[in-house]
Image: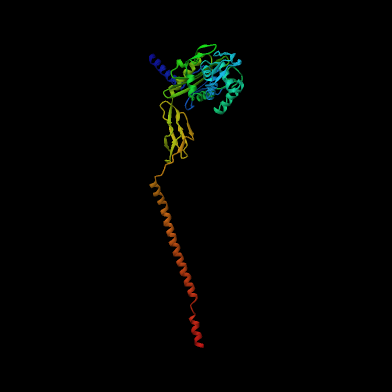
Amino acid sequence: MGQDVRWIKLILAIILILPSIVNADEKGPELNSEAAILIDAKTGEVLFEKKSHQQMYPASITKIVTGIMAVESGRLEEWAMTSKRARWAEGTRIYLALDESKPLKDLVYGLMMNSGNDAAIVIAEYLGGSVEQFAQMMNDFGTSTLGLKDTHFVNPHGLFHDDHYTTAYDMAIIAQYAMKNPAFREIVKTQKRPWHGQEWESSLVNHNKLLWRYEGTTGIKNGYFAKAGNTLVTSASRGGTELIAVCLKAQGSEKVYKDTIALLDYGFTHFETKRLFSKGKKVSDSMGVEYETVQDLYVTVQKGHVPHLLVNHRGEVTIQTDLQEKSLSGLLKPVVKEIPDQAYKIGLQAAVKPTRIFEKFAVLFGTIIIVIIGFILYKLKRGSQQPNITNSNRDSGTA
């Protein structure tokens, strides 16, 4: 009897604990980082977040913005010279010598792989005229191009300043944008690259250890200083799904890597990116009107779920997934079909024929009316010209 009671208690305990285990998995991993976010790189769908809109110090992940602005400048083959300010930059450097000239492309590699603060200053001074002017360009880029609301930059490298801050959400948007650029992607995924400098002849080794540790990692940047803690932005791709994870203010480099791996594992286990349609696909609305898609359309769904696509009579698209329902416009254009000549002629005859019958009927009807009116007028006129026979006979009798 006692054995049976113990079994019953064990079963009840399992039943009570199981829902909490399932719910914990649904909520996502427990993290050391104070703020974090996980998004689908293609769709921007938020898959997990923790204080993602809280303003925090970014440290060297700031260099993602500096790097993508340099790449998009179209001036990577131009040479820039190291100033005194760059030569004596604080923190991590690639040991540029005073007045040393390097192609901007090399400087971006040194910036993103080796986190060179001296490279950041040279890039800023070359493209912006000064560090301060380039910082303003960074802020303009963030607000006008990316629509950032909770980010402000004071420098191109991320060294501490009270007014230099961002959020996990904004950094995910920055990373999503930057990773769409093939040249930028090539730089941040590079593990090792030779470096030939006046004061340093060696190799650049990427500081992002996940490029070696986590399968499918494609970039992008880590950072650290005491008040910011350890920060890390990572992109990884598996089976057609690419995710971006951002972790801010972890207490230790290994903890920020552990948090990032936990986020990516969670994302790849539970979600996938599906393409609803590709550019040029024909779709019809509820009235049978045909449209053509103007771009590829991707959605994020939980694994095993099927997304649904609806097109209304105005050509607007509604996407229904297990995660959300949203309506989009501008994805479709009406298909204008050419009418064959023979079909056009038949349609034209069908349209013209009733018109001609009506015209003939109107002419006939009008003719009949005119004849009747003419006949009536004729009878009335003739009647008024007849002699008065009664009076004529009476007059003849008295004459």
Q: Quadrant of residue 321?
A: top left
- In this view, which residue lies farthest toward the bottom? 399
Is residue 157 something one can see in this rendering?
no
Is residue 211 something one can see in this rendering?
yes
Q: Quadrant of residue 158?
A: top right
Compare residues 213 and 120 and report the one nearer the observer: 120
**Render colour scheme:** rainbow
The residue shown at (50%, 86%) is: 396
Compare residues 105 and 399 and report the one nearer the observer: 105
Vertical arrangement, residue 44 with respect to residue 249, above or below? below
Compare residues 79 and 345 and report the one nearer the observer: 79
The image shows a total of numbered marks equal to 0
Q: In which quarter of the image is the N terminus?
A: top left
Q: Quadrant of residue 241?
A: top left
The residue shown at (46%, 65%) is: 370
Could you tell me residue 55's position as x and y percent?
57, 22
Could you tell me residue 60's position as x and y percent?
55, 17
Could you tell me residue 199's position as x and y percent?
55, 11
In the image, is 70 to the left or to the right of 320? right
Could you tell me residue 93's position as x and y percent?
55, 14
